Each structure stands twice: as structure tokens, then as C-alpha cells.
Image (cartoon, rainbow, N blue to C red):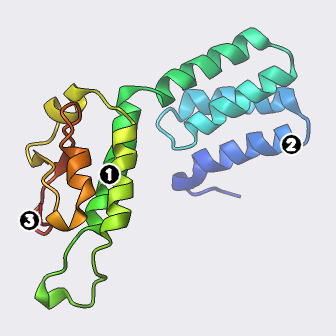
């Protein structure tokens, strides 16, 4: 059967995973090597690398497995990755603290406590000052949170942690 182009990377990853689960480790490694060469931009690329590392551990190729784990750890713990995660928390917080306009009364009321928790999680990631301030988009501003949030403003106003959030025309900031 022909796999649609949009799903070929996923199908290849699954094929390697099935071979792994069937204890056909050599075949799985071949598929994964091919996968990594062809699908470096795939959302399954890093999963494939972790699967390859797991197989290498089973085969007692500790040096090759350690190399993959080290490279992936650097990626996962990088400033850029932390910023991506912080941006997600901030978007959730902005959505949760959005106060609907009179014509949007069918939207839920703001949940400032939940927004506070998401902003706090973003701050825990301790992204660098340059990422918080310097690399912000043109539409970004230092957070000016609604007075209803209370303690959140004190958290954000800390001298060491100005937090950059996106300001848009639909979100009060």
C-alpha cells in the first residue's frame, strides 16, 4: 500500500518501532538510520533518535547511545527550548486572563489564578535576560498584568525577572 506523503515519516518511525518491539534490533537500526537521513525536520525525528539510543543500549553499544543521549539532553535543556516552553505557558496565561468584551459574553470569564500559575511556571524556566528582552518580537512588551491578578504583578515585577509577553489588540495588557 502507498502511504500518503504527509504520513511517510510517521509510518517509517512506526515500522522501526514494530521491529524493535519484535526484537529485530538490527532491522530497526537500519530503518532508523534511513529515517534520520531522510526526515531531519520530522516531528518524529527526536523520538527516532531516542529509540535508536535505546536499541544501542540493549546491544551494549554504550558509547554510541551516550552520544545520542548527550546531544538530545543539550537540545532539551537549551535556552531556545526553554523559551519555546515559556512562550506556551505565557500564551495559556494570556488566554486564561483575557477579559471578554461586551459582545463576547459567550466566552468564559478570566481565571486569574490559573493564569498566575502559568506565568509562574514560565518564570521557573529561568530563561536568559536576552531571550526575555532582546529577542522579543516587535509586538512584545514587558508584562503589565491586570490588577485583578494581585500577587502575579509582584511576581513579575521582581528586579531580576522582567517577563516578556505578547501584546495584541484583543488582549488587555
Q: State the residue in front, 60 or 33.
A: 60
**Tag in front: 2 or 1:** 1
Label 3 – label 1 distance at C-alpha: 20 Å
Q: Position of residue 115 (x, y in %)?
A: 33, 62
Q: Secondary structure at mark 1?
A: helix
- Which quadrant, please, contains the N terminus? bottom right
- Residue at x-position 24% and y-position 31%: 131
Q: Position of residue 82 (x, y in %)?
A: 39, 35
Q: Secondary structure at mark 3?
A: loop
Pointer 2 residue: 21
Q: Position of residue 170 (x, y in %)?
A: 13, 69
Label 3 – label 2 distance at C-alpha: 51 Å
Residue 51 can be seen, yes or no: yes
The numbered mark, 2 or 1, whose residue comes first in the sequence reads 2
Say if mark 2 contacts mark 1, CB within 8 Å. Answer: no
Q: Secondary structure at mark 2?
A: helix
- Residue at x-position 76% and y-position 28%: 54
In the displayed structure, does residue 151 sit left or right of residue 135? right
- Residue at x-position 72% and y-position 25%: 53
Say if mark 3 contacts mark 1, CB within 8 Å. Answer: no
The numbered mark, 3 or 2, whose residue comes first in the sequence reads 2
The numbered dot on residue 119 is 1
**Tag in front: 3 or 2:** 3
Q: State the residue in front, 79 or 173.
A: 173
Q: State the residue in front, 112 or 92.
A: 112
Amino acid at each position: 500500500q502507498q502511504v500518503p506523503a504527509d504520513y511517510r515519516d510517521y509510518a517509517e518511525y512506526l515500522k522501526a518501532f514494530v521491529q524493535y518491539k519484535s526484537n529485530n534490533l538490527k532491522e530497526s537500526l537500519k530503518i532508523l538510520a534511513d529515517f534520520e537521513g531522510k526526515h531531519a525536520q520530522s516531528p518524529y525525528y527526536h523520538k527516532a533518535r531516542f529509540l535508536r539510543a535505546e536499541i544501542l543500549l540493549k546491544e551494549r553499544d554504550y558509547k554510541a547511545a551516550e552520544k545520542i543521549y548527550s546531544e538530545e539532553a543539550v537540545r532539551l535543556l537549551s535556552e531556545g527550548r526553554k523559551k519555546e516552553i515559556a512562550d506556551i505557558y505565557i500564551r495559556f496565561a494570556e488566554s486564561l486572563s483575557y477579559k471578554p468584551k461586551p459582545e463576547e459574553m459567550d466566552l468564559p470569564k478570566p481565571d486569574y489564578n490559573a493564569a498566575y500559575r502559568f506565568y509562574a511556571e514560565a518564570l521557573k524556566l529561568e530563561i536568559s535576560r536576552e531571550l526575555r528582552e532582546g529577542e522579543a518580537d516587535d509586538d512584545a512588551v514587558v508584562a503589565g498584568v491586570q490588577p485583578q491578578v494581585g500577587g502575579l504583578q509582584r511576581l513579575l515585577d521582581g528586579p531580576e525577572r522582567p517577563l516578556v509577553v505578547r501584546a495584541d489588540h484583543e488582549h488587555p495588557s
